[in-house]
């Protein structure tokens, strides 16, 4: 049916969740809402990736624990794709850790499963409009940011990492072996709660380490 000139086209959405009950419930909700057009659903990260690469959508709603790649890896892969959807992580997160990691990975939003369904729908509308939507972060938690647990050497490595240096470059500049670089980076990633160098760099810029460069808040 052709829309009148005053109507807005439905937002194309794709869903992915490893829980079949959650996926079925979400599918029904989006299917019945005229503001959205449900393009595809999947129970795996690979299935979601294949679907959105074939038929581009504007917004994707994914589970952080999505089999088998996981939400974090899926976001990493799609971040470099020109027509990738803006992704919202819909998952369990009692302590706010998943929301933080989702933001660092490059997601556009996070919605806890404990919130009303309308919150998820409104978040999809906001994200489709170009907004970033994440829950409030207690400033006290930011003061206890794990980045402050890094040693001076690890902070220096992180700053160098943010400049795009490879492990070989780091070994040369710091006068250490490549294996020692890997050891320090592994420790750093564990302290920051990240999985790779891209997330560590995102953490660096988000945290704005004091005393390093002319960064201002």
Image (spheres, rainbow, N blue to C red):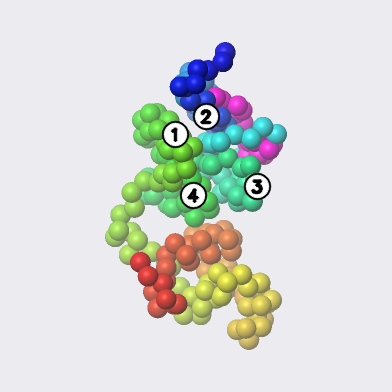
Distance of mark 4 from mark 1, alpha carbons? Answer: 18 Å
Q: Point out which mark residue 102 bears.
A: 4
Residue 11 is marked as 2
Looking at the rendering, the stretch of residues picked out in magenta corresponds to 37-53
Marks 3, 4: nearer the viewer: 3
User: Does dot 1 land on a helix, a strand or a loop?
Assistant: helix
Q: Residue 173 location in percent, x, y?
A: 62, 83
Location of residue 38 with respect to 205 vertically, above or below = above
68 vs 39, nearest the viewer: 39
Q: CB under 8 Å between callouts 2 and 3?
A: no
Q: CA distance from mark 3 to mark 1?
A: 22 Å
Q: Earlier in the sequence, mark 2 or mark 3?
A: 2
For this orientation, the residue located farthest to the bottom is 175
In the picture of the structure, the residue carrying the numbered disc 3 is 81
Find out whether the residues at labels 2 and 1 contact each other: C-beta distance under 8 Å.
yes
Between discs 4 and 2, the one toward the N terminus: 2
Of the residues tagged 4 and 2, which is closer to the observer? 2
Label drawn at residue 83:
none
Q: Is residue 111 magenta?
A: no
Q: Is residue 44 magenta?
A: yes
């Amino acid at each position: 049916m052709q829309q009148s000139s005053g109507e807005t086209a439905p937002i194309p959405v794709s869903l992915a969740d490893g829980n079949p009950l959650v996926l079925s419930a979400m599918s029904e909700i989006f299917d019945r809402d005229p503001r959205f057009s449900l393009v595809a659903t999947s129970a795996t990260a690979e299935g979601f990736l294949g679907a959105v690469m074939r038929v581009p959508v504007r917004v994707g709603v994914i589970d952080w624990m999505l089999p088998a790649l996981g939400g974090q890896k899926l976001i990493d892969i799609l971040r470099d794709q020109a027509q990738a959807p803006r992704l919202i992580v819909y998952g369990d997160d009692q302590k706010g850790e998943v929301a933080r990691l989702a933001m660092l990975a490059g997601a556009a939003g996070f919605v806890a499963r404990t919130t009303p369904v309308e919150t998820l729908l409104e978040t999809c509308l906001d994200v489709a409009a170009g907004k970033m939507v994440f829950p409030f972060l207690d400033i006290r938690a930011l003061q206890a940011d794990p980045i402050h647990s890094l040693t001076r050497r690890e902070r220096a490595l992180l700053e160098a990492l943010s400049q795009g240096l490879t492990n070989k470059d780091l070994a040369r500049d710091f006068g250490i072996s490549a294996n020692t670089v890997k050891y320090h980076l592994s420790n750093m990633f564990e302290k920051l709660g990240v999985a790779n160098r891209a997330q560590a760099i995102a953490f660096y810029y988000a945290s704005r380490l004091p005393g390093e460069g002319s960064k201002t808040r």
